[in-house]
Structures are given as C-alpha cells and as structure tokens.
Image: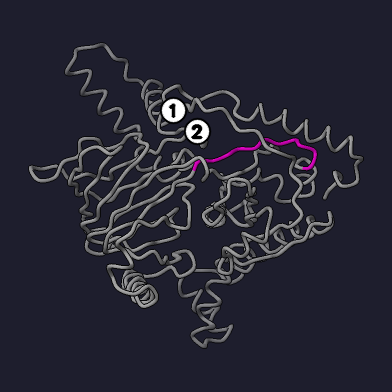
Amino acid sequence: MCSVRRMGRRSAVNLVRLGTRAVSLLYGNPLRPVHTSTRKAPEPEAAFRPEKVAVVTKTTRYEFEQQRYLYAGLSEEDFKQLLAMKGSSYSGLLERHTIHTTNVEHIVSSLRREGIEVRVVKRGEYDEEVVRWADTIISAGGDGTMLLVASKVLSKDKPVVGVNTDPERSEGHLCLPVHYTHAFPEALEKLCRGEFRWLWRQRIRVHFEGTGINPTSVDLHEQQLSLEQHSRAHRITTMDSRQRTGTLHDSFSKTSLLPIRSLNEIFIGESLSSRASYYEISVDDGPWEKQKSSGLSICTGTGSKAWSYNINKLAEQAVEEVLQIGKSQTGLDIPLNRDIIEKVTDEYNASLEFRPDDSRLFFSIREPIVNRVFSSSRQRGFASRVSVRSRCWDACMVVDGGTSFEFNDGAIATISMSEEDRLRTVVLQP
C-alpha cells in the first residue's frame, strides 16, 4: 500500500526499523506519579501496512430521523414539517449529513487509490464477521462510533483508527487530529513511513454469572429507546436467549465472558434515574458492602477524561467554599483570591485523569446514600478488580454509553482488565 509498496526491499526494512525506533518515543512526559503506569510500552512487530480495511460509518441524525418517519409511512414533506415542529432544521440536518458522507467518500477513495481493499459498513451492520475480514478498521464518525468499533475488536494486534467526519460538531478525542479529516492521504503517507506512534489502550472485560442477567445486548445508539421500550427489548431478548439455550439454570449457572470490551467505562444502575440503585460491591476481592446510590461507574485511563471526569470534578464554587471553611476552622491565613481557587480546582481535577495504558480501573460511586443500613467506605478509587451483585429492580449494565445488558437482582459481574484486551491505536501528530 501507499509509497511503501513501491519501495525496494532494503528501504522497506529500514522503514520498519524506523517505525520500531519511533515507538520508543510513544509516551512523552509522564503525568503525576500517583497515576502513572510503570509498564513499558510494547513495541510493534511491523509498520502500518493494511491490505483490507473496513470503514465503519455512523448513522447521522438526518438518516435516523428519515428512517423513523419513513417507517411511519410519512412523505418527505411531512418529514420536513414534523422536524420544523420540533424546532429542527431539515436543511441543517441534511447539510451535516452531506459533510459526513463527503468525508467518508474522501477516506474510502484515498484508501482505494493506494490499492487497499475497502468495505464500507454502517454501524448497524458492523459485526464479528467484519472484524475478522479486516486487518485494520477505521471508525468514520465521532467518539461514539469509535467506542462501538473498538468494543467488537478482541485482538490487540488489529489496529483501529478513528476519523472525525464532522469536526465542527464533534470533539473527537479518540480520533486523528482534525487536520486529517480533509487531508487523509497525508495521514496514510505518514502511517506508511512510520511517522506515528502505537498506543495500546487498556480496556475492561466483564464476566457475568447468576440470574437476572441476559448476555444479549441492546444497542442504545441505534434504537434510542424510551424506558418502556428499553425494558421490553430486554424482556424479549431474555426470552429469546432462554429459548435458545434451554432452562434458566443451564443458561446462567456458569460464568461467561461478555464478547465485547469497554474502552471508556462500564456503568451500572437502575434504568429509571429517579430510583436509587441497590447493589453489593467488592473491591479487589475485599468484603462485600451493601450500597444504594445513583449508580456505579468503572472507567479506564481513556475513560478518565470522559464521563468519570465529569462525575468527580469539582467546581470553583465548591472549592472556594471548602477553603473558606478550612480557613475559619484552622485560623490559617489562606489567600482566597481567584488565582488560588483556580489553581486548586485545576490541580484536583487534573488528578482525576490517568494514562490510557494504565492497567488499573477507577471506580466512582455516584451520590452514595449512607445510613445505618447502607455504607460507602470509599466513594472512588483505583482497583484491579471490582465485583458487583445486583439487587436492582430494572437495571442495566451499559458499556461505553451505547451497549446495554440487563442487570437485575441476582446478577453478578466481575470487572477487570487483561493485557490481551489492549486496543491497538495510533498517535499521529498534525
């Protein structure tokens, strides 16, 4: 592929060596010591030279709305009027859809010009067969599409590359720099020349056992279900699963490993957000503790900059109020000017982030209820292994905000990490 295919054997060997040496520069300056992994970065076996690439594209808002209204038998004009009634712009949605599809075509044509075999797959069509076929997978969308793509890639040797196809409306932390959205051939050339760094992101695996569970998932991104529909979907898939696998005891008496991995976080909680989640938790094989809270989040280093960060971050107002109390209680002369408050706030919030290659989990109890029955000895912290036993009424375990599994009374999940689950991604400078 690329210019590498046109080079001589000696030049290609030198290129591989160059790519290998470049990997040693992967991790730059470390973060704060408390959050820094001591494990050395693994080295790649070869340069980046894919022959078969699957391009997985997101479903745009225009496509979703159009499919929904056309399914109801409405005309295109009715579709426009209903969007207007909701305060949405038909032309605006169509414009964003066109931008996305144009950028997808740019990616695909760039790959094919280099002699690479390409399959374009909608996210709803993305499955294990697509993963097996491709030697590299490109996520064409935003971070949500990247998370879905990564969840089904179980091999640490298969690279996954994210391209943000609508950078004006999507942040795309997990994607290549925005510059390469419109200059993808340049990205290909740099990858072929070894001018990049491998980054193996740690991921979460989940073992299920007990009753109250269903290993068949519901895709929340595609269905955007209401609570009633969500519950009904889980009930239907549960019945289907039991019919396929036999008795309830046969289905759930053994521990099973979920066939997906989490790049950002696992969240466990009641589907109805106003209802407290009741469960038992054990951290690093410690004693079980009964808890009630607004739910439990367990994240990776990659996910520490996402939802987990926003769950735990402090606002300047809270920091100022705590410092005021500390000043009055201790009598210390603490200068509470704006610079000090901002510095303390930023320092604390920065401590919540840790490296994507860190092999530890970070758990967060959202709004724990503490009384004589329920306790919460640690509201957050690092762990190697977290076990959760559900006592919930209508709860789900949600993987990376998009894939949901029923997780009700009797279900037990053991959440951990394994070196073999690392996701192979690239770091490419603008």
Q: Confirm whether the magenta stretch covers residue 199.
A: yes
Q: Quadrant of the C terminus?
A: top right
Can residue 272 be seen in the rendering of this structure?
no
Disc marking residue 109: none
Residue 166 in the image: above or below residue 189: below
Q: Are marks 1 and 2 in contact (CB under 8 Å)?
A: yes
Q: Residue at x 51, y 74 (%)?
A: 83
Disc marking residue 355: 2
Residue tagged 1 = 35
Q: Earlier in the sequence, mark 1 or mark 2?
A: 1
Q: In front here: 335 or 416?
A: 416
**CA neighbours of label 1 inside 10 A, class few (<14), some (14 to 19), many (20+):** some
Residue 85 at what x, y percent from top left? 46, 75
Q: Bounds of the magenta span?
A: 192-202
Q: Confirm whether the magenta stretch covers residue 66.
A: no
Q: Which element type, helix, strand or loop, lies under badge 1?
A: helix
Q: In front here: 400 or 4?
A: 4
Residue 320 in the image: above or below residue 357: above
Q: Amino acid at mark 2?
A: Arg
Residue 116 at what x, y percent from top left? 79, 57
